[in-house]
Image (cartoon, rainbow, N blue to C red):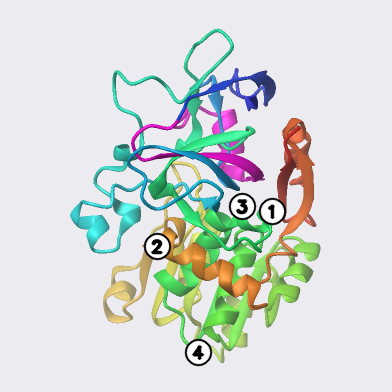
Amino acid sequence: MKAMVVRELGEGWVPEDVEIADPVGNEVRVELKASGLCGSDLMEMRSEVNYPPPAVLGHEIAGIVTAIGPNVTQFAVGDHVAGCLVQFCGKCERCLSGDVGLCRHPEDTLRGEGEAPRLTDAEGKELTQGMALGGFAQESLVHENMLVKIPDEMPFAQASILGCGVVTGTGAVLNAAKVKRGDSIVIIGAGGVGLNAISGAVIAGASQIIVSDLNEPTLETAKKFGATHTINSSEQDLVAAVKELTGGYGVSAVFDFVGATPTARQGYDMLDRGGVLYQIGMAGPDAVIETHNLANTFDRKGIQGVFMGSGVPKRDIRILSDLYLNGRLNLDDLVSAEISLSEINEGYEKLKDPETNRVVITKFD
């Protein structure tokens, strides 16, 4: 099959002919119909964080099941599926309590030592499979726990982004913060993930959805998704503006999709008593935030990390697809451009444009 491979860190993606194995155990082979471009894969291409080259990256996938391993019980050939990078065993105490993102044994979704690799290059050498999905290719071989069956009428481009950006943004609001009708919230960073937090807040019935960003085109898009107020933080004091909008009190929840120390500090400072700052964006390992002990104690303010929406992907992705099909979740405006597999490098250039939300591969010839 054709795949786009990272051979050297920072050197982009190159086309290669790659061998993909037949499914064993609980594995499912999927013919890909869509694969989204996410900033996490760009980070992995540039720096060896988890997936050393040579590697096939890509983790926002949707397609059709073409083969299943002998132990697969959840899927059949012909099923339409979307993937999610959350690796979970389904058997440990974390999984059984619903915290699959904190699974004790995510390695159960991988092949073990001594087993043939899922992906090999033309010389028979193993290729790293990024996030156990390897979606920048014509096909993917995935453990069934990382796939979700979707309705046949669900468009593949929109389905592919459900398993990362959409489930992360909406889940931060609906699962982690459990935003209620009438709440006032702030979303810092209205990119491809932050826009989904706006959608989640609309579904939850938040009365004030205050969105901050540095780019006017991005803020205009935020209004389209349901932001009630927008603030250009390059032109205004963000904390002061939020306090003014809330009668001096602040908000019950802030969602930081940037993750830098300055935005985290601003987010904490605009919280009302009992409010929580939810950290979703990932900055460098040196990014820290200092808080006041008295505020933490007497005002009961807090900071909470959020990974992949703090939910259960197999449940949430199906719910989100139903919301989309019922006209209650805006996914169409997220997909700004559709490209071919060979255009990944150009696709990431497109993502530098603040008017581009998500780029999705939909042509795999």
Of 97 and 239, the residue lying toward us: 97
Mark 2 crowdedness (10 Å alpha carbons): few <14, some 14-19, many ≥20: many
- In the image, 195: left or right of 120? right
**Amino acid type for the residue under numbered disc 2:** Ser
Question: SS of the residue at dot 4?
Answer: loop
Instruction: State whether residue 258 appears in this view.
Output: no
In the rendered structure, which segment of residues is drawn in magenta?
Answer: 23-52
The circle on residue 160 is 3
Crowd class of label 3 (few under 14; some 14 to 19; many from 20; radius 10 Å): many
Residue 157's tag is: 1
Q: Residue at x 50, y 70 (%)?
A: 319
Lower position in the chain sequence, tag 4 or tag 1? 1
Q: CA distance from mark 4 to mark 1?
A: 31 Å
Q: Quadrant of residue 230?
A: bottom right
Task: Kindly identify which residue carries mark 2.
Answer: 310
* Viewer-side label of 1, 2: 1
Kindly identify the amino acid type of the residue bearing the numbered disc 4. Answer: Arg
Q: Quadrant of the N terminus?
A: top right
Estimate how packed mark 1 is, as few (under 14), some (14 to 19) or many (20 or more) residues with alpha carbons within 10 Å: many
Distance of label 4 from label 3 (alpha carbons): 29 Å
Give the numbered dot on residue 334.
Answer: none
Measured in 3D between alpha carbons, the distance from the residue under mark 2 to the one under mark 4, in whole angstroms, is 20 Å
Left or right: where does residue 141 sit relative to residue 5? left
CB within 8 Å, label 1 to label 3: yes
For the residue labelled by badge 2, is the local secondary structure a helix, a strand or a loop? helix
Q: CA distance from mark 3 to mark 2?
A: 19 Å
Residues at badges 4 and 1 in contact (C-beta under 8 Å)? no
Residue at position x 29%, y 69% in the image: 293
Q: Earlier in the sequence, mark 3 or mark 2?
A: 3
* Amino acid type, callout 3: Ser
| Visible residue check, residue 135 | yes
